[in-house]
Image (tube, rainbow, N blue to C red):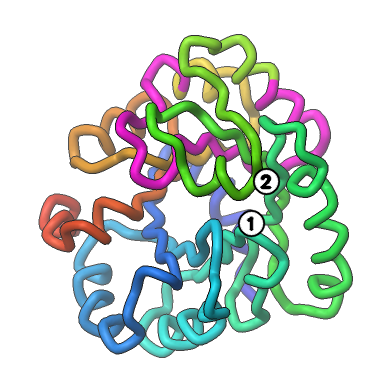
Amino acid sequence: MVNLYQNIIHAKQEGQKLLAVLIDPEKIDVENIPSFFKKVHQSITTHIFVGGSTDINNDTEKVVLAIKKVTKLPVILFPGDVKQITNKADAILFLSLISGRNPEYLIEQQIAAAPILKNSSLEILPTGYILIDGEKETATQKVSNTKPIAQKNIELILNTALAGEFSGKKLIYLEAGSGAKVPVNEEIIKTISDELSIPLIIGGGIRSKKQLDKAFNAGADLVVIGTAFENDESFFNHIKLN
């Protein structure tokens, strides 16, 4: 089995930038997945993330199965809670919301997930998840009942990221939130990237090729884009393979 984390580490060492398309099971029609992925395969996309803050209809596994039928790209769960875990994916971001102080998302969901993951074949990617203020209240804030860190408070963001690394997280994910008005700014990305020795993921509010390039140039190892594709699939035209 391919070790996805080692591939991410190798890409970081080689300076290769990675791009994940985030698919929310509540926002995609399974019947549209084959045509959607024709565009994905013509782009620089390297990973597929599946998940959302909620999955009211329990569609995660159905969506993952449909995706696996049409792509060989690695499919990684980005779950809002334990109910979104399915063994049909390749890996899971084992998220801990380290920017918040709600024990439900710091450790309790993880405890509930442990026996499921123990008996699964999913590659587990321990991830420190940090909410950054994107100037819009997000679903993650509402569900987790936590507040994001202000972008001006770079020291707190850095110390939170370092605490995540020192406590054994293998990835740090800075998230401005789905539909954020502004993405995580370049100064934050550069500061955190310069200090971490583990890969840095950036997501939320990136809607243009220019914003994507800024995130990569500032030091993001993997960028996640979701809303840009949900609102306008023509965005794929801006990130086509050479």
In what quadrant of the picture does the N terminus appear? bottom right
Number of residues whose C-alpha sits closer than 10 Å to that of mark 2, classed few (under 14), some (14–19) or many (20 or more) = many
Q: Give x and y (percent) for residue 205.
A: 33, 39
Identify the disc placed on residue 127: 2
Quarter where residue 102 is shown? top right
Position in image of residue 15 (x %, y %):
42, 38
Please tell me which residue lies in front, 237 or 57: 57
SS of the residue at dot 2?
A: strand
Dot 1: within a 10 Å radius of its alpha carbon, few (fewer than 14), some, or many (20 or more) residues? many
Tag 1: amino acid: Leu
How far apart are the alpha carbons under marks 2 and 1? 6 Å
Q: Say which residue appears at 51% left-offset and 18% top-offset.
A: 150
Specify whether 117 is left or right of 3. right
Q: 3 and 103: which one is in front?
A: 103
Q: What percent of the width, then of the height, locates residue 231? A: 21, 57
Secondary structure category for the residue under label 1 = strand
Disc 2 residue type (three-letter) = Thr
Quadrant occupied by the C terminus: bottom left
Query: From the viewer's perspective, is 137 left or right of 145?
Result: left
Which region of the structure is painted magenta?
160-188
Is the residue 208 above or below the residue 132 in the image? below
Q: Residue at x 61, y 61 (%)?
A: 79
Q: Which residue is mark 1?
A: 93
